[in-house]
Amino acid sequence: MNTTLMRKIGQGVAIGSLLVGTPALAQDAASDATIGDRNPVTKSVQTQVDKKIDQQVAKEQEKVTADAVDALSAMVDAIDSLRNGDEQEAREHLTDAIGRFEVLTTRNPDLALAPVDTSVEVFDLYADEDAIKDAIHRVEKLLDDGEVQQARTLMADLASEQVVTVEYIPFTTYPDVLRRAVVILDDGNLDEAASMLEDEMQLVVVTSDVYPLPLLRTEVLLDEAKELAEKSERSGDESKRLTDLLDGADEQIRIGHLLGYFDKSETRDFRNEIKEIRRKTQGSGHGKGFFNRIESLFKKAHKKSSQSASVDTKTGD
């Protein structure tokens, strides 16, 4: 990881790649007017969905360890000073970095990896069920025909998710490495000291969690539906809204299943619960506790997402 990259650490969470009309699905828009359309009731809660995404961004940003970021910044400054031939300034930054990493180690004796950067990417698919089914059918046909790369391109569009990536450094070895750099500096080998520090900063552990947007949208839709279901005196418009919200939630579960976020068992459980809520709220039906079971399903689904995190390592330039 070079010093330019390291300076990006601590600037906050970046939202990248918001895909609002994916090319492979959009290419047939002229012949299918429904492609790109989204259920009106789902559109109506987009503000709440965006708010939940913003909350997730803030939550992930809190994971970044400020002490680790400050210590890394001091280390980067030391490398710059070494490369610029400024021995005195390099010593000051090295001393500062050693002190900061020691404080970090003392405060977190059981912490082996320190989170130093986080990002959230949102990949959204603006397409209805029929369009998704058609795309899946085309992927299957392309694979049957041996057109793997074309299928791969189309498959890349079949995603509706929030990907949270956190970068960690194995910081516990840094104080000793910084002290060795001071010894090398004492011998007058500034470039050697800089190279050793840069080598130490090469390894970064990266974790990625995927949170399905159909699940998030279903939650938002059912949050509003729950409020209406508990009202003892709903108006006709409110009862229609409740029906629409439940229909929208059911659609999002079906879409999530099509995209592979929910297996058959999960899909069945979610849809059965929505069906049961619909039955209990027919006409003027109302009450509390109707959503308890489905809320437990949400918790289980979120836990599954967090446990399926991928872990990788990367090196800098």
Image: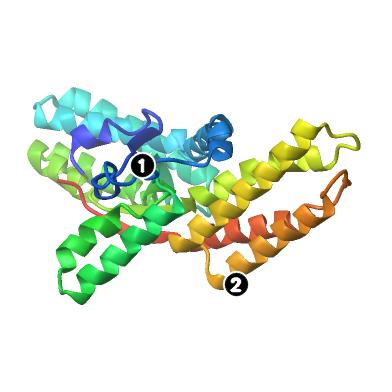
In the displayed structure image, the side of residue 248 where residue 12 appears, left or right? left
Horizontally, residue 92 falls left or right of residue 289, namely left
The one nearer the camera, 118 or 299, is 299
Mark 2 element type: helix
Disc 2 packing (10 Å; few <14; some 14–19; many ≥20): few
Indicate the position of residue 132 as horizontal and vertical percent values.
38, 56
Question: Which residue lies most toward the front here?
Answer: 31
User: Can residue 188 be seen?
Assistant: no
Say how many tags the image has: 2
Taking 206 as reference, is 6 above or below it?
A: above
Which residue is at the front of the view, 269 or 279? 279
Q: Residue 108: give x, y in percent of width and height.
A: 53, 47
Q: Amino acid at mark 1?
A: Ala
Task: Kindly identify the amino acid type of the residue bearing the numbered disc 2.
Answer: Ser
Which residue is drawn at the image coordinates 85% and 51% (left, top)?
A: 289
Residue 125: x and y, percent? 39, 46
- Say which residue label 1 marks: 33
